[in-house]
Image (spheres, rainbow, N blue to C red):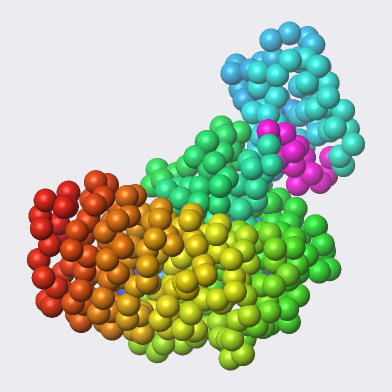
Amino acid sequence: MKMIRKLLWNKKVLLVLDNLDNISQLKNLAESPYWFGKGSRIIITTRDSHLLTLSGVDEQRIYHIKTMNEDESLQLFSNKAFNKNHPPDEYYLKHSKSVVKYAGGLPLALEVLGSFLCGRIKAEWIDALDRLKQIPDNDILQVLKISYDGLRNEKEKTIFLDIACFFKGRQKRHVTQILERCSLHATIGISVLIQKTLLVETADCRLQMHDLFQELGRNIVKQEYPNSVGKRSRLWKFEDIKEVLEKNKGSEAIQAIVMEDDWYGKPELEVHPEAFSKMSSIRLFYLSNLFAEMPGHFSNHRWFILPRGLKSLSGALKVIRWPLFPLEALPLETPLHKIVVIEMCKSKIKQLWNDKQFMTNLKLIDLRNSPNFMETLDFSRVPNLEYLRLSGCKSLVKVHPSLGQLKELVEVYLDGCENLEILPEKLETNSLTKLDLSECRKVPVLPVQHLTFIY
């Protein structure tokens, strides 16, 4: 705040604060007009006019966005439904006006409904309009839900809800990778959502959706059990996650728990030892790497602690990302045959599996910078492993020779493992593209012919 005032007090600036939803945002970025030079302009957009009142904005300076009139609405709807400025005949004109009436002049609703009805036969139009008549015209979320209900299968709906609850604004490649590993066919699913205008891909390849669509998705999840967070399919708020994991309120309804970059200023969360025992359907447990990657006291803080241990994980898990994992091993009795990704950087892990566990679907192991990890076990228990990331595991001395027998191996990162001495004598895979041994000064040189590239 001091830097903003110091740098801009004598400069003429145009400042746009888009989608303001908390008064603290304004106080931190532009608490007073006197922070900026004479002639500056501050534009605020918000769906909560009360925030403007709290900010002391003069009522005469507030502009309330108007909805589109009937002619404008009809033209926009026609562009989406018929790819022209007007319906093709009287039949479609009559029904288009009915849609325009229900959309209430909201451009987003007109675009969504137009895209939904585009290319559909007359019988489908009649059915869609009958559904519209059952929805209050002032409840735009229910209007938008028509497009959600029109998705072809449950996987498309699952992808939409996952992005609305967890991944809005994230890189498309990153989101696609996570959801693909959850067996959701995300590549085609995301493409369908973009075509139906439920999602937008930005110029920098991020997945965005209108705030109303995010609100719709999260509202769908909240309405599953309005008064019981442990029976909802998805958890993303710290307070809800804390209640479920600390008080063991989980259920078979929970499909995913994701908390992205929302740890700052939060207290430690003490996970109940049986917190996952009832979550028989959870496929995704994903905590942000934000503070695990930061220097200083943040990287040593355990936001999720297990003072009484962890009795089990769910056998349904496909992706687990738990940085700073505080135990030396995963629960030994957990059947992790469905797991595809294990990411536990900066953990206390010493052993990742035992002689009773087979992880036949596991493709990625990431234990970077885990100081206690000393030796890998038999890789025949993870026969389809593609990516092994053990960078910075300074206690690692030996890599089991069975690593060389993995046929699907693509990348191996052992850089920074300064005490590593023993590697497989032979790598039989033809798919390996990267082996990083930088700073591994005690390792003998591997035969070049066994590698595609050495970095």
* Percent coordinates x, y for residue 12 in the rendering: 37, 63
Left or right of 375 in this view: 69: right
Indicate the quadrant where residue 385 lies: bottom left
Left or right of 3 in this view: 46: right
* Residue 250 visible from this viewpoint: yes
* Percent coordinates x, y for residue 254 in the rendering: 70, 62
Outermost residue toward the top? 89
Outermost residue toward the front? 355
Question: Is residue 78 placed above or below 371 in the rendered structure?
Answer: above
Indicate the quadrant where residue 106 lies: top right
Viewer-nearest residue: 17 or 342: 342
Magenta residues?
Answer: 137-152
Task: Tell me the residue at 30%/56% (across/down).
Answer: 405
Task: Tell me the residue at 34%/49% (across/down).
Answer: 408
Viewer-nearest residue: 143 or 48: 143
Question: Is residue 40 placed above or below 66 in the rendered structure?
Answer: below
The tally of labels here is 0
Where does the N terminus fall, quadrant-wise? bottom left
